[in-house]
Amino acid sequence: MKMWPIVSYKLSTQESCPTPSVWVTAPCWTDAPLLTAAEQVGQSILENLGQDREKIQRARDRLRETDTNLGKSSRILTGMLRR
């Protein structure tokens, strides 16, 4: 099996292309099935991030609603204590 580079993206001002820093036993990184698989993984990650964002937004909304309700409760209790 051929050895193909995993490319690091450490570019200096003089370099125009990444230079290989680690060599591994793997299929060519320009292989179409590998690129397709990488694209699918990337798409899956983006979908997961989108779902996580929605969950965080819903949690934030619930937190704001709870905070509002706590404020109302506090004002009611304060009013009851003053009577």
Image (cartoon, grey):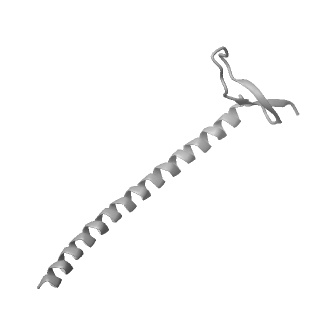
In the image, 29: left or right of 65?
right
- Please name the residue shown 61% across and 44% down the image: 41
| Quarter where residue 34 is shown | top right
- Please name the residue shown 82% across and 35% down the image: 24
Instruction: Name the residue nearer the viewer: 36 or 83.
Output: 83
Instruction: Name the residue nearer the viewer: 6 or 71.
Output: 71
- Please name the residue shown 21% across and 72% down the image: 72
In the image, 46: left or right of 63?
right
The residue most toward the front is: 82
In the image, 44: left or right of 52?
right
| Quarter where residue 55 is shown | bottom left
Q: Is residue 6 above or below residue 51?
A: above
Q: Is residue 22 above or below residue 65?
A: above
Screen quadrant of the C terminus: bottom left
Instruction: Name the residue nearer the viewer: 78 or 29.
Output: 78
Screen quadrant of the N terminus: top right
Q: Is residue 13 above or below residue 24?
A: above
- Residue 11 place in picture, x, y as percent: 65, 23
- Residue 26 place in picture, x, y as percent: 80, 36
- Please name the residue shown 76% across and 26% down the image: 20
Image mark count: 0
- Residue 38 place in picture, x, y as percent: 64, 39
